[in-house]
């Protein structure tokens, strides 16, 4: 980390003490550009060093500093890395710094005075919520269930065994099939017995055999799954979801399956969709999306990135309403959004949300795009 300029350090503390002149505010804003993020983070870290209580360990302190730094930079850059790009006035950007810094500092001081081990992040919206850090789990046909280590970078099924990418085997005994499932706030990667790769979004599952025997490869999925299928003309790959069957030879596609709705988005290759209720089939080409709702199937052209960005840790919504965006956030941050009675916000936005951001950083961007406010109380988020 670079050394801090004594002048900038002085201006930063003058700002915190509300003694900056207009010219000094301008200079402070000009300095905190993209090239000086490290110095800003160090200033924030030094500010917290005076108030962090003993009950907050180094890891928790780093989370706080990163959270504040991210929020500050989003405001100062006017949205360069915001989920939604909207510019804040310079003075408002610095005012937000003051609220964030002083708000968390006061909270930490209260923790110290109460001598409590309870640790919660706070923000300008009240509480704050970090991205979920939960583990997927695998359930075997013998009834045994294991929690999968999220640090092992995925699961491989090979030659009748289950092992992590690093080669460590799971103790499973002999089983015929397995189901990998993800809770809210969790994604997971699985390599199937034929080498095909699968990514599970939050609240999703895939059931597959230990080995693909016979003349086909068949799996069952729920939730949202991205698949890259190894080609094998002699053994077609079948995906069953709700009232739909997908047949492929070698391709990459995304499947969303919930309730009576199935949405299949083809990235490359070809797939044949079959409505299980009426037997009608539809052939998809790259860029096609087949949407089955009840008995009705429609096929349209889409930008596939919109539907597969989640695999790279991005929540992406094009021309999305606030309610649509909040539904996505609920799946990742494990919170519940509540809207006022008669809420009728018709604003649409282009959202590109990094799922490593604190919830408050995301809400700051949504606030300016949809012209609403938020209040976080535990795991409940109220739209004002």
Image (cartoon, rainbow, N blue to C red):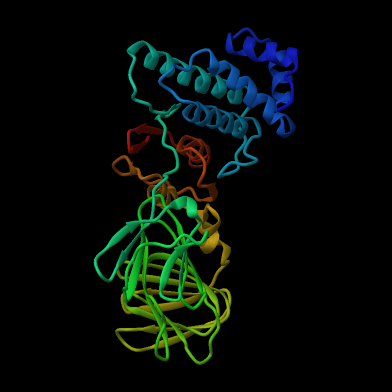
* Front residue of this view, candidates 163 and 179: 163
Q: In the image, residue 222 lies at what x, y percent?
A: 35, 67
Residue closest to the far left: 143
Q: Position of residue 92 (x, y in %)?
A: 58, 24
Q: Closest to the observer: 148 or 289?
A: 148
Q: Residue at x 45, y 64 (%)?
A: 163
**Quadrant assignment, res 39:** top right
Residue 81, quarter of the rendered image: top right
- Judge whether residue 26 can be spotted in this image: yes
Quadrant for the N terminus in the image: top right
Can you tell which quarter of the image residue 296 is in? bottom left
Where is residue 124 drawn, in percent x and y?
45, 26
Q: Is residue 189 above or below residue 129?
A: below
| Horizontal arrangement in the rendering, residue 307 relative to residue 174 (left or right) | right
Task: Name the residue nearer the viewer: 350 or 63.
Answer: 63
Which residue corresponds to the image point at 60% horizontal and 17% vertical from the top-left? 46
């Amino acid at each position: 980390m670079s050394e801090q300029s004594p002048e900038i350090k002085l201006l930063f503390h003058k700002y915190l003490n509300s003694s900056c002149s207009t010219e000094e505010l301008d200079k402070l804003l000009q300095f905190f550009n993209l090239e000086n993020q490290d110095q800003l983070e160090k200033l924030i870290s030094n500010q917290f060093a005076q108030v962090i209580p003993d009950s907050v360990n180094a890891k928790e302190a780093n989370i706080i500093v990163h959270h504040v730094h991210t929020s500050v930079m989003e405001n100062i850059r006017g949205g360069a890395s915001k989920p939604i790009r909207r510019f804040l006035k310079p003075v408002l950007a610095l005012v937000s710094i003051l609220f964030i810094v002083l708000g968390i500092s006061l909270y930490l001081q209260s923790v110290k005075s109460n001598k409590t081990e309870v640790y919660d992040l706070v923000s300008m919206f009240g509480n704050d919520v970090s991205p979920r850090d939960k583990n997927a789990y695998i359930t075997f046909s013998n009834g045994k269930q294991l929690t999968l280590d999220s640090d092992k970078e995925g699961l491989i099924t090979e030659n009748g065994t289950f092992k992590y990418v690093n080669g460590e085997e799971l103790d499973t005994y002999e089983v015929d099939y397995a189901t990998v499932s993800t809770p809210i706030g969790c994604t997971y990667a699985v390599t199937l017995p034929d080498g095909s790769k699968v990514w599970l979004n939050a609240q999703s599952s895939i059931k597959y055999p230990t080995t693909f025997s016979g003349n086909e490869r068949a799996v069952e999925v729920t939730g949202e799954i991205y698949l890259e299928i190894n080609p094998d003309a002699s053994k077609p790959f079948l995906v069953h979801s709700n009232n739909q069957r997908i047949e492929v030879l070698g391709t990459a596609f995304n499947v969303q399956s919930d309730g009576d709705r199935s949405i299949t988005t083809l990235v490359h290759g070809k797939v044949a969709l079959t409505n299980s209720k009426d037997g009608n089939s539809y052939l998809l080409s790259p860029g096609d999306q087949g949407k089955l709702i009840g008995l009705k199937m429609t096929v349209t052209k889409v930008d596939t990135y919109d539907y597969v960005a989640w695999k790279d840790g991005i929540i992406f919504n094009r021309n999305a309403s606030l309610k649509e965006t909040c539904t996505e956030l609920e799946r990742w941050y494990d919170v519940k959004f509540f809207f006022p009675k008669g809420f009728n916000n018709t604003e649409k936005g282009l959202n590109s949300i990094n799922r490593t951001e604190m919830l408050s950083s995301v809400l700051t961007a949504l606030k300016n795009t949809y012209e609403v406010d938020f209040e976080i109380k535990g795991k409940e988020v109220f739209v004002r």
